[in-house]
């Protein structure tokens, strides 16, 4: 893994912007779509441009080859499960809060990377930076206007969803030699296979009458926040490593708060702003440490 260059940081920022904007779109989509169906349609929208891209570039999609199991597992852990859990959580909490809760990903990602990768070991300074970022999230639990008895379970569900992203990230590293477009397309196809029966059995989507607004939000989630974003994420993972990639979770809440405040008219309290400052401090410490680590 190499030390991050300016282009890598720019790509990470773009990924943070895309994913930060996804949460208010998830919120809008939940007005008309239930969780399994939302996740299903999102990945279907993502599959279409990915398949077209692979066909155009003459890339073989290995989703159903002899070695299909890793693609299936990643499709389940990295897409189907977190997409569903985050949709369940975001339906009941502020969209920017869902974005901020994604900052728990670096902690779980770093712990997993320490045990399951060779070159992503936890250092003292890195631990301090990640811990400070986590404290920024913990501080939100003292704001009863934002997190209270009525929604705390949905907060925990969202955090669990972010943890599955870290698990999926570790698994994705095992396929880094299989090609960006192939891995992204193959795992997305498998997520469709997992989500389709769940949607049909538990939610009966054919009986719904979704709004145009929710459907457009879901289209954005599929094509941009899933298809395009997963291609960017895979590139960062393979070039810069899991811990660098999980730093995007510190950028997501910043963009998420901006979108939630200006586009969704969600209430921003002083505790939210302090939490953001703490998270940014965590970013600085982790970044400073990464510059001194050989990749």
Image (cartoon, rainbow, N blue to C red):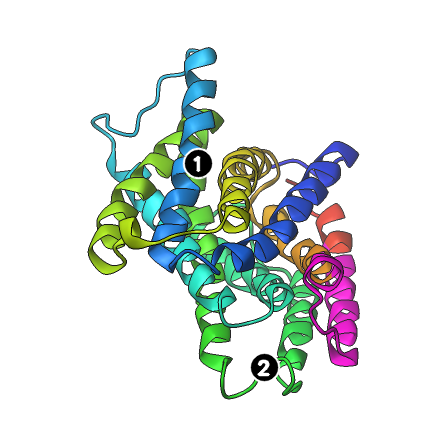
Residue 58: numbered disc = none
Task: Examine the rendered structure and indicate whether residue 64 appears above or below residue 190.
Answer: above
Main secondary structure of the magenta stretch: helix
Residue 23 visible: yes
Number of residues whose C-alpha sits closer than 10 Å to that of mark 1, classed few (under 14), some (14–19) or many (20 or more): some
Q: Quadrant of the N terminus?
A: top right
The numbered mark, 2 or 1, whose residue comes first in the sequence reads 1
> What numbered label is drawn on residue 45?
1
Q: Nearer the viewer, residue 5 or 59?
A: 59
Question: For the point 50% across and 88% down, which residue is it?
Answer: 149
Q: Quadrant of the C terminus?
A: top right
The quarter of the picture where residue 258 lies is bottom right
Residue 249 percent coordinates (x, y): 62, 56
At x 77%, y 62%, the residue is 280
Where is residue 58 shown, x and y percent of the image? Answer: 42, 11
Taking the image as shown, residue 218 lies to the left or right of residue 61, namely right
Which percent across, then down, holds residue 215?
49, 45
Query: Which residues fall within the magenta stretch?
Result: 258-286
Could you tell me which secondary element the residue under label 2 belongs to?
loop
Determine whether the residue tagged by mark 1 lies in a helix, strand or loop. Answer: helix
Residue 167 located left or right of residue 9:
left
Q: Return the residue at label 2.
A: 147
Report, in whole angstroms, how far the alpha carbon at label 2 lies from the one at label 1.
Answer: 32 Å
């Amino acid at each position: 893994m190499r030390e991050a260059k300016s282009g890598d940081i720019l790509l990470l920022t773009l990924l943070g912007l895309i994913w930060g904007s996804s949460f208010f779109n998830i919120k809008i989509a939940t007005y008309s779509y239930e969780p399994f169906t939302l996740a299903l349609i999102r990945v279907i929208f993502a599959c279409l441009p990915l398949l077209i891209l692979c066909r155009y570039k003459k890339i073989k999609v290995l989703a159903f080859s002899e070695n299909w199991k890793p693609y299936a597992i990643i499709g389940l852990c990295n897409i189907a499960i977190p997409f569903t859990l985050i949709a369940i959580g975001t339906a009941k909490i502020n969209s920017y809060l869902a974005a901020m809760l994604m900052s728990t990903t670096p902690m779980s990602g770093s712990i997993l990377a320490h045990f399951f990768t060779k070159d992503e070991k936890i250092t003292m300074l890195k631990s301090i930076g990640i811990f400070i970022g986590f404290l920024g999230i913990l501080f939100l639990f003292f704001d009863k206007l934002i997190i209270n008895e009525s929604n705390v379970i949905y907060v925990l569900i969202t955090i669990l969803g972010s943890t599955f992203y870290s698990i999926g990230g570790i698994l994705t590293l095992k396929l880094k030699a299989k090609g960006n477009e192939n891995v992204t397309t193959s795992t997305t196809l498998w997520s469709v296979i997992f989500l389709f029966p769940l949607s049909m059995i538990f939610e009966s989507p054919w009986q719904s009458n979704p709004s145009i607004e929710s459907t457009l939000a879901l289209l954005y989630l599929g094509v941009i926040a899933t298809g395009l974003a997963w291609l960017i994420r895979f590139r960062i993972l393979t070039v810069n490593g899991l811990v660098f990639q999980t730093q995007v979770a510190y950028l997501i809440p910043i963009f998420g708060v901006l979108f939630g405040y200006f586009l969704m008219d969600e209430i921003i309290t002083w505790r939210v702003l302090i939490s953001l400052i703490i998270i940014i401090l965590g970013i600085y410490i982790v970044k400073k440490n990464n510059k001194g680590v050989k990749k």
